[in-house]
Amino acid sequence: MEATANLSRTWRAFREARPGERFRKAHRNRLRSRKGAWSTWLAVGAGIVLVAAGILALPLPGPGSLLIVIGVALIARESALAARATDAVELRLRRGAGWCRRFWKRAHPAVKTLLVVLGVAIVAAAGYGAWLYSTTR
């Protein structure tokens, strides 16, 4: 029960922190509550394994991206360098997502339709290629 409450508090603090400072703040909090070197090595090792599994799972349907994000977050909790880099990447991703939202709102319906059709075609082509690859092996 204590572990669930602690995880809930940690997630709430992470979510409420300002973008661009979340991972550094999580790293500082982790330094204050450090249990030992083994927990650090275990978290970094688990993070590396999750990132590798996520990269391998990217071409497959499933949570490859989610595994990568969780792995990077585990590593960033243990490393100040990784925390700074992850905060910088988060800011860039948020900026890019904002640009995409603004573009989508201003775009003409014909452009939106073309982009959706193009996206479906790309996904269909990737699926067909994966199917061909799996049947020829």
Image (cartoon, grey):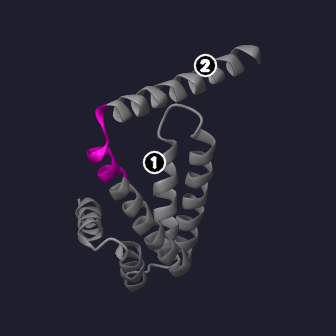
Q: Quadrant of the C terminus?
A: top right
> Left or right: 83 with respect to 111?
right
The x and y percentages for residue 56 are 63, 42
**Which residue is under mark 2?**
128
- Taking the spot 51% from the left edge, 81% from the top edge, the residue there is 80
* Neighbourhood count class around disc 1 (C-alpha, 10 Å): few under 14, some 14–19, many 20 upward: some
Q: Tell me the quarter of the picture where residue 107 sits.
A: top left
The structure residue drawn at horizontal position 26% and vertical position 46%, both measured from the top left corner, is 105
Name which of mark 2 and mark 1 comes first in the sequence.
1
- Amino acid at dot 2: Tyr
Residue drawn at 27 percent across, 65 percent down: 15
The foreground one among 90 and 103 is 103
Q: Which mark is residue 41?
A: none
Residue 7 x/y as whole percent: 29, 63
State the residue in front, 30 or 57.
57
Left or right, residue 26 beside residue 10? right
Q: Residue furthest right?
A: 137
Magenta span contains residue 4: no
Magenta-tinted stretch: 100-109
Q: Check disc 1 and give the amino acid type.
A: Leu
Residue 81 vs residue 88, the one in the foreground: 88
Q: Is residue 103 above or below residue 89?
A: above
Residue 12, position as x, y percentages in the image: 23, 66
Quarter of the rendering containing residue 29: bottom left
